[in-house]
Amino acid sequence: MEKREIERANLKVSSIGLGTWQLGSDWGDVSEERALEILQSAVGAGVNFIDTADVYGDGRSERIIGKFLKNNPSNSVIVATKMGRRAPLSASFYTYDNFASWVDRSRENLGVETLDLTQIHCPPDDVFDNDDVYDALDRLVDEGAIKRYGVSVETCSQALRAIERPNVSTIQIIFNAFRLKPLDEVLPSAKEAGVGVIARIPLASGLLSGKYSKDTIFSPNDHRNYNRNGEAFDVGETFSGVDYEIGLEAARKFAGLQSEVAPATAAIAWILSHDAISTVIPGARNIEQLKGNLAAADQIALGRSINTGVVDIYDQYLRSAIHPRW
Ligand SMILES: NC(=O)c1ccc[n+]([C@@H]2O[C@H](COP(=O)([O-])OP(=O)(O)OC[C@H]3O[C@@H](n4cnc5c(N)ncnc54)[C@H](OP(=O)(O)O)[C@@H]3O)[C@@H](O)[C@H]2O)c1
């Protein structure tokens, strides 16, 4: 597995990481046994970057990863977790004291002394311009509670403001064939600054796999059912904010761009064909999906070859609704 360097983090991360929202909640049920199997297979295949958050299953995802780390003490996996979503979404909660207590809980869940990478989890917009927030994070680094920090963002403007902060190691942003705006400014700026870019929701919540239809039913405890219009959190986190029926049509066109690999593999390979991306973190609910995602590591040339087609689909179906919004 290719490793990509994150200059500001002083880390080399696998170009394909693992998203573990699925191992917590909000995607229907995934058993602990299945979750541990996915982690084991991913790391066995060379994945060294795992993304989680303290709210995924209210800590379940972190605790399962903690169990995996305990059972595999010799591994050198980097776990990136997130904090900030256990409190109401208001800038007043982004204080040193709250950070310290959230970090302590994640350390306990993961069974580690120091967190490898802590990301502020899509905070309110004004948090990005608050010096006290970055000072509090610097203090946690100085105290040895966290090794480094990053920010998970909703918008390109937030990413650009975070990149300007000298101690932000990584930004995590939605970047996939249905969300091209980061190409305009965010990716070039991050590259220039040596900030790592973690590409989340690479399959547009599965849409880009081409496997859904208008009759697909998502279970009641799956956000693709209950957050389709942003009822629970930012609508961009569900199908990348793309209208479902338009997304189905765009996904059909995407699947027609090539016939060598599965659309999901091509979607991840396309992301990896951008060298400003440090790691892409597809979520997998079973081993078969994991394998399809990991196969993208060997398909970067194919990813590059479909670029014109990706831009055409975006321009035709998505740009006018998506580009101004995030
Ligand atoms: N605010 C934030 O910071 C934030 C928000 C969202 C996500 N994330 C992180 O980003 C990670 C990835 O994003 P995501 O999980 O939301 O979306 P995603 O990776 O775009 O989509 C995951 C879904 O795609 C389907 N899938 C995965 N691999 C497949 C394959 N090879 N073939 C066919 N279908 C496949 C599965 O859907 P089915 O369930 O239908 O099988 C899976 O649940 C998360 O796990 C999480 O770690 C962070």
Image (cartoon, rainbow, N blue to C red):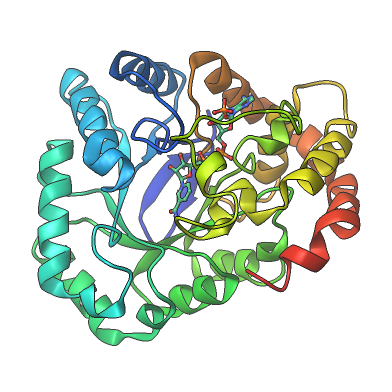
Camera-nearest residue between 205 and 150 = 205
Figure check: 226 above or below 38: below
Figure check: 319 above or below 308: below
Image location of residue 41, percent across then percent down:
42, 16
Q: Quadrant of residue 70?
A: top left
Is residue 112 in view? no
Horizontally, residue 101 falls left or right of residue 38, namely left
Circle count: 0
Residue that appears at 68% across and 28% down: 216
Camera-nearest residue between 224 and 201 = 224
Figure check: 287 above or below 142: above
Camera-nearest residue between 290 and 318 = 318
Residue that appears at 74% across and 48% down: 177
Figure check: 226 above or below 216: below
Residue that appears at 24% across and 64% down: 87
Q: Quadrant of residue 88?
A: bottom left
Is residue 274 in view? yes
Residue that appears at 24% across and 43% down: 58
Q: Say which quadrant the C terminus sits in.
A: bottom right
